[in-house]
Amino acid sequence: MANLDDLTGVLVRPLQLLRSRPHNTLDRLSIYEGASRDELYPEPRGIPRVRTRRRWSLPGFENEDLTFASQHEPMDPLFNAHYHARSRRIQTVYARRIRPKGTEGRPRLLYIHGYMQPETVVEEHGLLGVIARTLNVEIVHLQPPYHGRRKPRRSPYDGERFWTADVVRSFEAMRQTVLDARTLLSFMLEESPSPVGVAGLSLGGAFTATLACLEPRFAFAAPLIAHMHMGALLRDAPVLGAMRRDLARFGWTPSDFGDFFERIGWNELEPVIDAERILLLAAEHDRFFDAEVMRAMRKRWGDPEIHWYPTGHMGFIPHMPSAIGHLRRFVQRLDLP
């Protein structure tokens, strides 16, 4: 329920006391505001050279690591210098592939996890393994920058440097996530002609929605409990209290943050895949991703299929079996080749 969302915000406060203090980069945002959509969200430059390594094998399952160099080039000159000089962990893209036996030629799924989510065995076996087997598909799980093996060694928790009041760093992390996902898609389609869909949970769902607006090569998209209105997310999410306080010290409100995304055309993005190939799953009492913002996004997107759950954001987790069932039926109805 919504109270659990608020409790989550309270529980992360002691952890966020360990965060590094963000730089004020608000005076450097004009470089994005004058850029074209192709500059902000470039297409991948060819097929990456991907290294594969077998992680484990269980009866009916195989698991591999996929790694390749990120093609991301920060637009801000100062951050670009920092990125190439010191941030080598996020320059490498890590993905995990879970492949149930017998899925050759079946559709595949690129999955993006949520904010502050570490790489865990529970997620790998309890969530991704269940989705892979239920849908009978191969899943490739992308780790966004500053999470999992891309977390800087001095960061006290996953995602600590992804969402901060250093807006340049935060937006570059968003740009990199989008490009890394599109680059991984290029590799998957080069490897096999079978179609690839994209799904994500929470912040990963926000990126799923963004990719549905930028990448027509995805066969379907399923954002889970997420919209893509960044100003509303900063305003509402209980776990972003530290970012709100830091931005307030710099003289910005969540509305100012939302206005920045308005100026760069983020809120004008619309799906480049048909509404029939989009599935939305939402929580009626979500304190992270507001239900009214979800309804507005759905209307703007041509009313794709949606399923509502009578819970809050964190309370959605017990409903995952139902959500996976909706996703399975949705993919089956698409009748993908």
Image (spheres, rainbow, N blue to C red):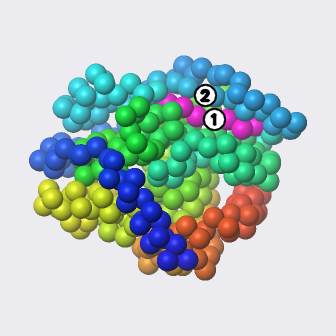
* Rendered location of residue 87, percent (x, y): 34, 28
In the structure shown, which secondary structural element does the residue marked by tag 2 occupy? strand
* Rendered location of residue 202, percent (x, y): 51, 59
- Which residues lie in the magenta part? 93-99
Q: Is residue 225 visible?
A: yes
Residue 334: name its quadrant: bottom right
Within 10 Å of disc 2 (Cα), the crowding (few <14, some 14-19, many 20+) is some
294 with respect to 314 (left or right): left
Residue that badge 2 annotates: 66
The amino acid sitting under disc 1 is: Arg
Residue that badge 1 annotates: 96
- 256 is higher (above) or lower (below) than 154: below
Residue 317: name its quadrant: bottom right
- 335 is higher (above) or lower (below) than 9: above
Q: Is residue 326 visible?
A: no
82 with respect to 129 (left or right): left
In reply to whether residue 8 is colored magenta, the answer given is: no
In the structure shown, which secondary structural element does the residue marked by tag 1 occupy? strand
Question: Going 21% across and 58% down the picture, which residue do you hit?
Answer: 247
Question: Going 54% across and 19% down the picture, which residue do you hit?
Answer: 49
